[in-house]
Every structure is written in structure tokens, then in C-alpha cells.
Image (spheres, grey):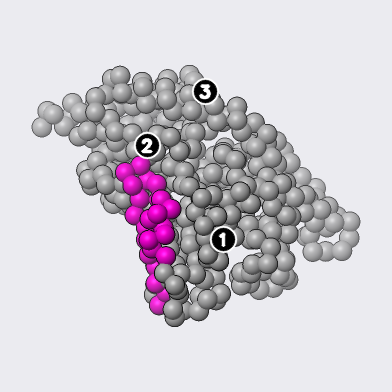
Amino acid sequence: MPRELIYADNAATTKMSDVAFAKMLPFLQEQYGNASSQYSLAMKSKRAIEQAREQVAVGIGAERNNIIFTSGGSESNSWVLSSVPVLFGNKGTHIITSGIEHHSVLRACHALEQKGIDVTYLSVDRVGRVTLDNLKAAIRPDTKFVSLMLANNEIGTIQPIAEIGRYLRDKNILFHTDAVQAMGHIPVNVNELYVDFLAASAHKFNGAKGTGILYKRSGISVPQIVFGGEQEYGLRSGTENVAGIVAAGYALEENISDMRGTANRLVTFVQATIDGIRAKVPNICVNGDPENRLPGIVNIAFENSSGESLMHLLDLKGICVSTSSACTSGKDEPSHVLMALGLSEKQAKSAIRISYGKYNTMQEVESVIFAVCNAYDKIFRATSNL
Ligand SMILES: *Cc1c(COP(=O)(O)O)cnc(C)c1O
């Protein structure tokens, strides 16, 4: 009998919602019109895109024409960051980000440095928080732009974006947030956050892979990224991913409608996981902010263990968790996020990230706890026999 898979890696990607899946299907078959054509088949695609744009806009307190669809969170982040030299020039431009951003932000910043832009990477405290005071101390007369993530994908820590955004708006410094992990999981409102740009990704909130969102505040421009038929307000040409866009609208709407209930369940799952593992395995260290955190993500470091080995042993039991971020796994490097928290390389390499989503059950959580404790025991016995 094939074992049931237990998926506890929802920070890497999520299963599609049934509703979003059903709503996207017609646009792959019966309603395949190109949204730019003039007959009624095409109009259906056009209308569906605009309806999704409205759903996303309503979801984050934006106007419909502030929403641009992209191919994913990485593209949205890269697009905003690569706009910096176009908006402000290469020389005499200083920008600020943090050391725990997603690689789509960090590597875009490295590319900007190559062009002569000055970048400050803010450090974070032991729980992964950037503070307003830290940020204030880094601001210079030539600071033009700040990019900080709303919630971290490895440890779940939520940054004080609203507080920072309000300060930056007063200073006339443009502010971008990577909200990929937050969208559809915690309330996100672009006005309350005082952000000028925001990136999100549908596959992280039960939509389809390959659809991203870029929010851009009215009156603020980004340079055109794709040339052609002038789709997406002339900024990102190319025939639209109608099905993915439609799914994004419905998936976000659905997640927002039962956000509070889902979050309450996930918090219970995470607490049970911490308590259950701690009861059997001494000296675990839970990384991230115990208070300001995403409901479903927990990152745990173990004594004298290896996250890589734990992950593989769990995989043999049909349980999907992650060592740190999916993007860095496969390389034998400790997570840049855990290192920034001040963990040793050994501690950082011992950690696993368990991330629950709305389709997980308490029964699955119990299986995860049991399997993690067993796997740790195996590793521990193997190493102490040496
Ligand atoms: C997943 C993720 C991204 C990248 O999104 P894609 O749609 O997979 O390109 C960016 N930032 C964060 C915080 C993420 O978790």
C-alpha cells in the first residue's frame, strides 16, 4: 500500500485550492482566447484577467490599476530592484535592505552593487527582526530606496513594516516589501503598510505556480520590463497567463475569507509540534520570533544533528519538510538567515523548517512529531556510536 504523503513544506509551495483549480481550467481549454484579440471568445479572457486584478486589489486594499501580473515572486522582486538605477541613477544612490531577504532580493542587490550602487544590509536581532532604530541609523542623505520583507520564509518572523513604512513615507524614500510569505496568510494592506511596491506569488497561497503579483502605488513608475504588445499597462508585454491569473484571484479571495480560522489552526499545529518534539528531544532551539511570526512556520535546530539527514529520514517516511530554504538546499552551505540570527554553522546546519498549511490535519501533525523524534533518535544513536 502506498503511504499517504504528509506535506509540511508549505513555505516552499502549496497545493492548489479546489476552487482556484476549477476556475482556471476553462481558460486552458474552452475559453482559450488571447485576451488581446477583438472577438467575444477573447473578451472572456480579458474580463477574467480584470476580475482577478480586482480580486487581488481588494485583497490588499489597492486600486485595480496598481496590480501587475508577473511570472512569480522572484520576477516581482527582481523587477523592482532592477528599477533602482533607472529611477535614481547608478552614482550617488544608496539603498537599504536586510541580510535575511530572499535570494531574489539579495542577488538583485549584489547586481546593483556591480553597477556602483551602495547597498547597506541591515543586521537583525536574535529573533530575526529589523528595528526602526537600526534602519534610521543606516539612512544617509543619498538613501533613495529600501527593500524589506514582510515575513521571512525560513523562520516566519514578521517585520515591523508599517512602522518603517510610515517613517520612510515622511522621508520620501521609496519602500518595497517582499510579501510573498505573508499574502493570503496574514492581513496585508498596502495603505496600512505605507509601501510603494509589494511582491507576491500565487503558488505560496494555494494558487498556481508561475503567477506573481507586483503592486505599484499610483504615481510611481517602474521601467517597462518586456517589450511587445503592451499588455499589463505597457509595462510587461506578452500574452497573459490567463489561467494562472484567474487562479490567483480566487485563491487569494478564498484564503482571505477563512484567514483567521486557518491561522488559529496553524498556530495550534506549530505549538503542538514544538511541545511534542521538546518532550522527547532535549535542547531543541526554536528559531525566529516567538511573538511576531507567521502562523504555520516553525524552524527548529537540534543538538548534534544534521538537518539534511533529518530531512532525508523524514522523506523515507513520506513526510516533506525542508532544511532551510528550498532555493539554497542542494548546496552544503548554512542558511544565511540562521547565520544572521547568530547561530553557529553547526547549529544552522542542524535545523529543519516545518511549514503547515490549510490542508494539514492534527493527525498529520502528530505523525510529523513522532517521525521527527524517531529520526533524531536514529541520527543521535548513529553519531554517539562512533
Ligand atoms: C518563494 C519566495 C519568493 C520567490 O517566489 P517565486 O514565485 O517562487 O519566484 C520570494 N520571496 C519569498 C519570501 C519567498 O518565500
Going 49% across and 54% down the picture, which residue do you hit?
164
Outermost residue, left direction? 386
> Callout 1: 10 Å neighbours few (<14), some, many (20+)?
some
Ranked by sequence position, the earlier of labels 3 and 2 is 2
In this picture, is 67 found above or below 173?
above
Mark 1 against mark 2, which lies toward the viewer? 1
The span shown in magenta is 115-139
Q: Which residue of the protein is positioned furthest toward the front in this rendering?
A: 170
* Left or right: 21 as drawn, with respect to 85: right
Q: Secondary structure at mark 3?
A: loop
Camera-nearest label, 3 or 1:
1
Q: Horizontal and vertical percent for residue 110?
A: 39, 67
Q: Amino acid at mark 2?
A: Asn
Pointer 1 or 2: first along the chain = 1
Badge 1 amino acid: Arg
Image location of residue 4, percent across then percent down: 49, 25
Q: Nearer the viewer, residue 24 or 359?
A: 359
Which residue is painted at 89% across and 60% down in the image?
39
Dot 3 crowding, Cα within 10 Å, few <14, some 14–19, many 20+: some
